[in-house]
Amino acid sequence: MAKKEQVDVLVIGAGPSGSVSSAFLHRSGFKVKVVEKERFPRFVIGESLLPRCMDNFEAVGLLDVLKKQNYQIKVGARFVRDGKDCWFDFEDHYSKGWTWTWQVPRGHFDKVLIDEVASWGVDVAFETAVTAVDTSGERQLTTVRHADGGETLIESKFVIDASGYGRVLPRLLQLDQPSVMPPRSSIFSHFTDHRRPEGILGERITLVIHRKDVWLWIIPFSNGITSVGFAGNPDYFAMYDNDDKSKQLLDMMNDVPFVRERFHDQEMVVPGMMLKTYSASVKSFFGPGYVLAGNSSEFIDPVFSSGVTFATESGVLAAKLAKRQLNGEEVDWQTEYVMYMHQGIETFRAYINRWYEGDLQDIFFFSHDSANSEIKRQICSVLAGYVWDTSNPFVRDYGERALGSLSKLVKIYE
């Protein structure tokens, strides 16, 4: 017979979304339990943060422990196309907010976050998989299986699914639906980086545009290791298809002079890994007694490093709204959660679509050379994650009108 537990809130997943939501609710006086299928640390990408994340870490009391880790400071992004550079510096973005963030090895970063939360007294159970959920009653009944095969039935007043790619509730409650984004793939690993350039060129994230529909990232960490990966059209990946993903990644890197010269004889620290058709969506972000946060709700594309921003933004907001509901307040989840997150998701979606069409790439390099620095500041604000600041014309209407007008202007000057 399964053991039984009672908590106020069950959080599924110990990544950034689960950490910030459990941190907020614990500090608000609720009994919180976090269950996580994996054993930390574990390898995961999404290693380049955005300044907007800092607001969320600060809001739940997790910023100080992160500052102690000496992660690589990220003050902007560098884009490279046909040997030409385009730079965006966060200190010159349009919105009020943070002007820097970090580039982090996520295995270490995620463990720091959840270990800090656990040190406050939150019950965190690793190697604990959710096998069933019943949301039909006043309280949520969740069955979990432990590494030793034993089971526990957890009764909670509310459930936050922050399970990321595990997508626990979408899978168990049949909430998954196809993404509207075209299928794209990614392949990646970590490398030693003994030829890392000195100064800002060696510290800053670099995105290399290999083809209009294929790009690669170079993300240096403060520990001397660098993340390298490709993302884009699966047809390109099929040209190099190999069961040995380490070999496939090396073959792809060898055909890009920009990375071949820097990494051709460097050690691959972890085996190459691949994600196919990584975009995901759901029919509903919430239901009776539960809400989806982070990648368990929607994941678009890694090109602008929006993943951890959405994870922490949704995690904090979900926790705030759950607190109000548990305290007896009426919460309009559709307006206060779904529509709010929709603003950010659709803004990034508009930028990502135009990126793969090539329009946004042209806009980036045009704005970089343009005398109109205000345009660049407004675009930079989006790249910093401030996609809820609708005073920015490149955020208002999800940026569609401003991007469309600028795209036409760029074509005139081509």
Image: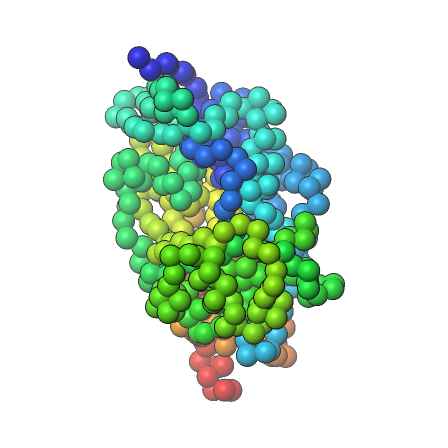
Position in image of residue 182 (x %, y %): 33, 62
Residue occupying image coordinates x 56% and y 74%: 257
Q: Which quadrant is home to the N terminus?
A: top left
Q: Is 264 left or right of 91, judged from the image as shown? A: left
The extreme bottom residue here reads: 413
Q: Nearer the viewer, residue 135 or 14?
A: 14
At 47% across and 28% down in the image, what residue appears? 126
62 over 371 or under it: above or below: above
Q: Is residue 410 visible?
A: yes
Give how far across and how far down residue 185 sits, in percent. 39, 59
Which quadrant of the structure image shows residue 234?
bottom left
73 lies left or right of 126: right
Most foreground residue, 284 or 170: 170
- The answer to which quarter of the image holds residue 111 is top right
Q: Is residue 62 above or below residue 155?
A: below
Query: Visible in this render: residue 34?
Result: no
